[in-house]
Image: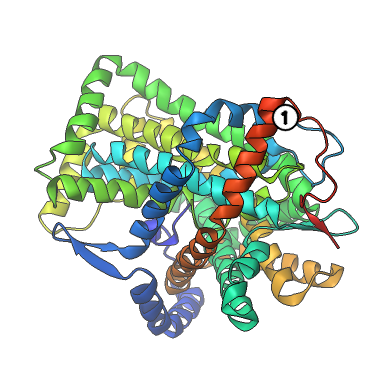
Amino acid sequence: MISPSASMSVLAAEGGALSGIEDRIDSVFEPITKVATAVIFFPVNIAGEDRPVVVFWLVLAGIIFTAVFKGVQFRHFGLAVKIARGKFSRKEDPGEITHFQALSSAVSGTVGLGNIAGVGVAVTVGGPGATLWMIVAGLLGMATKFAECTLGVKYREIDADGTVNGGPFRYLPIAFARLGRVPAKFLTGVFAVAIILFGLAGGNMFQANQTFAQAKNVTGGEDGFLASDGAALVFGLVLAGLVAAVILGGVKSIGRVTSKLVPSMGLLYVGACLVVIIANADKVLGAFGEIFGGAFSSSGVAGGFIGVLIVGFQRAAFSNEAGLGSSPIVHSAAKTRRPVSEGFVASLEPFIDTVIVCTMTALTIVIAAPQAWIDGQQTVADGGPTPDGVVVTSGAFESVVSWFPNVLAVAVTLFAFSTLLTWSYYGLKAWTTLFGRSARTEATYKIIFCVFTVIGAVLNFGQVLDFADAMLFLCAFVNLAGVYLLLPVVRAELRSYLAERRAGTLMQAPPEEEPVGLRK
C-alpha cells in the first residue's frame, strides 16, 4: 500500500493560485488531522522511540490467527497456489471474477510505494536487520488475510443481476449484532466512511499526483515539456480517462486489467532488482549476513534489537494491508462456492507483497547502495530527517545502470495506476453501502472519483492525505474486532473444506443450504 505521508516531499504544488487553494484547504484540515492522527496512531514508547499502537494491533492479530488456525498459511501454501490457478473452480460457481483476478486486483492495491520508498526508509532507520522482521510480519499477515477474506465471501450477498456485495460491509453488522442494531450499523458506517475518504484521497489523489511527479521527473524535470503551464491538468484528464475506461466496466473489467497489469509490473520491478543483485553477485552472501545479523544485534540502531524489530513490523504492516479490511471487498467477488477457498488465495497477498517484493527491494539497497543507508542511518541517529526512501532505492538502481531509475519510474507509474483501479472499487462498495445501489448512485461515485483524479494531478493536499491515511488505519480497529468475534465461523469453514478435500468432493456443488452468498 502507498502511504500518503510517506513521500510528501515530492508532491509540493507550484506557487500561485493553486498553492493558495492548497494552503486554505490544508489549514482547515490541520486541526482535524492532528486529532485523528493522535487517536488512530496513538504512540507508545518502546526502546526510546514512539511507535503507533495500530502496528501492534495488526501484528498481534497475525500471531493470534496463526496460532488459532495452526499455521494455515504454511501448511496449505501449495493448496492456496492451486486454488489461485483455478484447480478446483467450476464455471458455474457464483461470483464475478476468478480467484486469480481477485488476487491480482487485491495485490494491485497493496503493492506500491510502500514496497519501494517504505523499504528504503526501513533499511535506513532500522538497518538491514529490519528486512527479516518485515518478512516475519508478512508471514503472520497471511493468516490475517485468510481469516478476513474467508468472512468476506461467507457473508456476501449476490444481487439478481449477479453483482456481488461482500467484505466487511456484510460481516461487520453480523459480528457486532450482539452489541445491538444501532452500534452495529454505526461501526459499519464508520468503516465505510473511512474507506471512502482514503479511496478518494490516498487511493486516488495521491496516486495521480505521484504518477505525474514521476512522469515529469523522467521527462526533463523543470526543463521538460511536462513543466509547462497546464501540463498537469492535461495529464490528469488523460489519466482520469484511462481510469474511467476501466472502472465503468465494474469489477470484471478491473479484474481483467489487473490480472495482466500486476504480473507485468511485478516482473518488471523484480526483474530490475535481480539485474542489480546479479551484477553484485559477490556481495549477496554478505547482504544476507547483514540482514540476519542485524536483526538480532543492531547496536547502532536506535532501540537496538527491539528498535529493529519494531521498524520491520511497522513497514510490513503499513505495506500489505493485512487486517485493514480492504482486500476482503474485492475477494468477496471471487467465483467460488466455498468461502475458505478464497481465504487461501488471499493468504498469498502478504507473501507476494512483503516476502517477495519488499525483500527484493531491501536486498537491492543493502547490496548496491550500502553507503546511502549507512549515511541515512547516521543522519537519523544525529537527529536529522529521515532520507527519502525512493531516493535511496533509486540510487541502488543507478549504481548498476545509469538509466535504471527510468525503470523505477515506470514501475511506480504502473503501481499507482493499478492502485487507482482497485481503490475505485473499494470506495464504490463503501459508497453503495451508505447510499444504496442504483445506476445513478454508482455513476455519481465514478464521476466524483475521476474528478478527484484530475484534482490530484494538479494539486496536493498534505493535511487531507494525512487525515485519509489515519482513516484507513481506523478501519483496522473496527475490522479486526469483527474478525475476532467471527473466528469460530472461519474455523468451522476451514474444517469443512479440508474434510471435503480429503474425501475428494471439492469439485461437487455443496448442499443448497450452505451459505455461499445470500441471493437477494
Horizontal side of 391 relative to 23 (left or right) equals left
Q: Position of residue 516 (x, y in %)?
A: 76, 49
Residue visible at 45% across and 72% down in the picture: 467
**61 or 67: nearer the viewer:** 67
Q: Is residue 416 visible?
A: no
Residue at the extreme right: 160
Within 10 angstroms of label 1, few (less than 14), some, or many (20 or more) residues?
A: some
Horizontal side of 94 relative to 194 (left or right) equals right
Number of numbered discs overlaid on the protein picture: 1
Q: Is residue 88 above or below residue 487?
A: above
Q: Position of residue 80 (x, y in %)?
A: 60, 32
Residue visible at 75% across and 51% down in the picture: 251
Q: Quadrant of residue 169?
A: bottom right
Q: Amino acid at mark 1?
A: Gly
Q: Quadrant of residue 103?
A: top right
Residue visible at 56% across and 61% down in the picture: 457
- Can you identify the residue that label 1 sits on? 86
Horizontal side of 50 relative to 78 (left or right) equals left
Residue visible at 66% across and 33% down in the picture: 499
Tell me the element at label 1. Answer: loop
Residue at the extreme top: 282
Q: Position of residue 93 (x, y in %)?
A: 82, 40
**230 or 179: nearer the viewer:** 179
Q: Is residue 184 visible?
A: yes
Quick one: quadrant of the C terminus? bottom right
Report the colour scheme: rainbow
Q: Position of residue 49 (x, y in %)?
A: 18, 60
Q: Is residue 248 above or below residue 418?
A: below
